[in-house]
Image (spheres, coloured by chain):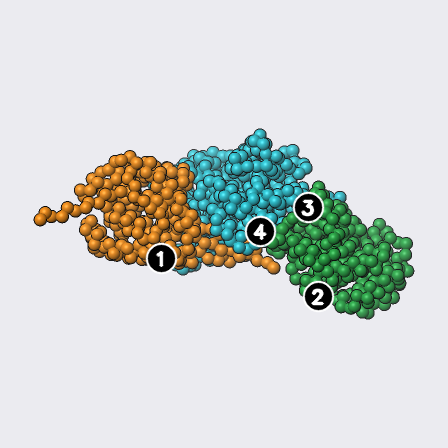
Amino acid sequence: MFEYAPAPESRSVVDIKPSYGLFVDGRFVDPVDGGSFKSINPASEEVLAEVAEAGSEDVDRAVRAARKAYEKVWGPMPGRDRAKYLFRIARLIQERSRELAVLESLDNGKPIKESRDVDVPLVAAHFFYYAGWADKLNHAGFGPAPQPLGVAAQVIPWNFPLLMLAWKIAPALAAGNTVVLKPAETTPLTALLFAEICQQADLPAGVVNIVTGAGGTGRTLVEHPGVDKVAFTGSTEVGKAIARAVAGTRKKLTLELGGKAANIVFDDAPVDQAVEGIVNGIFFNQGHVCCAGSRLLVQESVADRVLESLKRRMAQLRVGDPLDKNTDIGAINSAAQLERIRELSEAGAAEGAERWSPACELPERGFWFAPTIFTGVTQAHRIAREEIFGPVLSVLTFRTPAEAVEKANNTPYGLSAGIWTDKGSRILWLADRLRAGVVWANTFNKFDPTSPFGGYKESGYGREGGRHGLEAYLNV
Amino acid sequence: MSERVAVRKTYKLFIGGKFPRSESGRSYIVQDSNVVLASRKDARDAVVAARAAVKGWAGATAYNRGQILYRVAEMLEGRREQFIALGVPAAEVDAAIDRWVWYAGWSDKLPQVYGGANPVAGPYFNLSAPEPTGVVAVVAPEAPALLGLVSVIAPAIVTGNTVVVAASPAQPLPAVALAEVLATSDLPGGVVNLLTGRITETVPTLAAHMDVNAIDLTGVSDAELAAELEVKAAENLKRVLRPAAADHDWFADPGVGRMTVLLETKTVWHPKGV
Amino acid sequence: MRTIHGMTATATSARSDLSELGRSETALRTFLHGLPGVDQVGAEQRAAQLGTRSIKTTAKAQAIDLAIRMVDLTTLEGADTPGKVRALATKALRPDPADPSCPHVGAVCVYPSMVPYVAEVLRGSGVHLASVATAFPSGQAPLEVKLADTRAAVAAGADEIDMVINRGAFLAGRYQEVYDEIVATKEACGDAHLKVILETGELATYDNVRRASWLAMLAGGDFIKTSTGKVPVAATPPVTLVMLEAVRDFRAATGRQVGVKPAGGIKTSKDAIKYLVMVNETVGPDWLDPDWFRFGASSLLNDLLMQRTKLTTGVYSGPDYFTLD
């Protein structure tokens, strides 16, 4: 046997402070009417830092700082200069990438190879991409002189803490808005390190404000009358609550919500790559991915063979210490999320689906869930309908392309879909019919700052990335 | 010799390409004519008709949709006098005809302007293209009754959506007359469905309906009602177009915003390899 | 239409009898073209991903010794002489004269005319003696000549024959011809093991690599090997990945295990370890053995030895401390 020895990334590259304040008007400040909470490492349950919880007065101060910066500095600043700040930020992210990656893995539980090779490089790329738009808005196809909206309230989730921050802040700032961003309560630390990067870049005070806290802080922020724009990534349930909260206002709203993507494998698929795509589709980031390929639709004639290959491949997945460079699946982000994954998995078994996981030893402390597949799943099962947001795949079969499309679309969600076949015309036929904002054909879970991302139906509205992503932050 | 007795018109709903009366059997009087007072059931029927029409209409070629919208302009031009007789100012009728022509041309251009290739950093073909969102509920502006109506229907349907339109309650006759134009313009049944009657009766049903993908609140002048409708629309995350400003200039260049808000962007990735 | 049917079977699936396929060109073509396609980008990404594994300390030591045991220490030059190949064979036996715990390599690989000199050195050592044959590297000679070449090498003491396939025939779709040549060469080998060189650099696509792999296995090859080392593109991780998938699926389908040998261009320990990771995670421990996986290489050995010394002594070594044979 060839046993890989532990290959831990050093955590000494990042300096975590015992406590963090709010980042308001260019400075870290103590909350005025808030409290504090602890951010823990989900792989060990160790407390990483004490973080301020912003109260309504704190949120108000942040919004006012953003307003002032919008009116006095950032709004009037020529686009070419806004661009230079964003380019600076992109460069600083590249320079501090190791630090950011380690901190992200510590706070989130995701494997270091993902934070290092996927999250952080995409974060830098996103700032680099939108930096270039700041002085070209007149040519972006939104008319001769599109205007920013003002102050953007941005609430982001815990699955890609820094990447979601980049998706929110980079286009907002490029378009000339200022922002108040609330990171998720389980993963605030990289946003606070990003605040330090803003200081290092000499970004004018108030352009970026970070208010940490839980759902209450987020609600206060999106309901604040001083914000002109609300952008949210998270659950469909909260997305609906936000849509109700902004009803009747002039706040522009974009929502990036849940999904239950179908990953469709035909009998002529490049099968080894399809199996990789299935694995990447559901086990990337522990399945904490809104666009995860959580429903495998496999053509019945090859289902057994594909599943055998999939199981063999799953047996190679290495679950464990997120900081180990060889870890494929890290920790579940929180006890609450672990509970939800367990609850839905138990429902799957209770409803008669067959559960399988490879033999794998899970650490004793921390939050862990073995990669799992359910076979014999039908459209009526909860695990085929509800977003599990964990490393759990539901396997369904189909007989014809039309049936595949019908099943794929038979969900209130519409974020992404996958197609695996060697037949080009079939790909295009399916792509036309799938009601999903991103269709990956013979690949899965690919992201790029130039590529618009967002959902149909209850997966939200608006797009992030590309030229389309600017629209959310302009008065068009 | 006695004067010829005129044949009066019965103004009915327009649902699924047919002109039914309300299932409720109710009507109200406008300009001495009985106009149907649509019920919640009529609104639901209209949604069913609109949904049934999505596949064919969204699946039609852009060229075909453009030709049909242009055909609407041709038919409207032919009935110009009829609308003037209903009290629509001639300049408004002309502007409404021109608006159909303007939007007709967008059918095969918007996907080029609004979509395209994305230069991703990797060996992938990556293309974004707009698609219709599906069934759109539309509250037409109270005035101008014809131009306003055309200005909300045309941008929704040119890209492949189907609509259920609540006509201006105060001036429904141009709307019903427009339905007659649409019925004779090769527009497939169900693409445009028209409800007359009270906004407060039909629109809340549409706003809450889980099989409606978007709602255009342009014609809702009551801010409180608009907020209520937006709250209902949140239940399935309908795309929402908020009420137009009271001083909105319907004769001005409409821009592309009314089309783009009712579109989804689909991005397709594929590896490039041998 | 391509179909997965009959292909990705694993150990639990029913075994198929594929021995009839070689009897007709049509059957061969239907079978080979029915193999699932390989998406280039996906295959390359998977190979690159496996290359990011971090193999440290004990795992690295284990991997280096295994890699040394898997080296087919090779010299295939027109300028090869008895003296040169004897020195090489001596090195094969004791790669690190300063450290008796260092294992010997898997085999020495030379031209047929050099086989007798190497055989003298290796006799009874457990190090195999491989000879290229069949008009290596082009294979552009009459079949009779190629078979005579093979027989001569075996008669001189080679217990492994590295043959080249007829790429021209393969690319022209004359699969039967390629098949028959492999069958004939296998027969000419007698008890010697047959490694079939696909020359993947000339096959151009991974689909072809997969088909050629299956063709070679169907015809009786004991090993499939990437390259001669004589064309610009030699072994690459994705090509080797596709070949590993082929041997994995072939064993599942037939029960017969076939070895894999990437050759050419593998120069560093880091590269070699990446291949071992790929073997480990694609076909598993059954192939982590010199009987089932080899590296066709020459300069790789010295790098492995330097890394080995570093691990045992903690000091970085230099080329002056290792023999250049």
Give the amino acid type for the residue marked by disc 3 in the picture. Answer: Ala
Q: Position of residue A369 (x, y in %)?
A: 61, 36
- Dot 2 falls on which chain? C
- The residue identified by callout 2 is C168
Q: CA distance from mark 4 to mark 1?
A: 36 Å
Residue C316 left/right relative to A326 = right
Name the outermost residue toward the bottom: C79
Q: Secondary structure at mark 4?
A: loop
- Dot 1 falls on which chain? B
Q: CA distance from mark 2 to mark 1?
A: 55 Å
| Residue C9 tag number | 3
Residue B156 left/right relative to C18 = left
Give the letter of the green chain.
C
> Which quarter of the figure is the N terminus of chain C placed in?
bottom right
Q: CA distance from mark 2 to mark 3?
A: 31 Å
Q: CA distance from mark 1 to mark 3?
A: 54 Å
* Cβ atoms at labels 2 and 3 below 8 Å apart: no
Q: Residues within 10 Å of mark 2 (few under 14, many from 20)?
A: some
Give the amino acid type for the residue marked by disc 4 in the picture. Answer: Thr
Q: Secondary structure at mark 1?
A: helix
Does C73 sit above or below residue A335?
below
Residue under disc 2 on the same chain as residue under disc 3: yes
Q: Residues within 10 Å of mark 1 (few under 14, many from 20)?
A: some
Give the letter of the cyan chain.
A
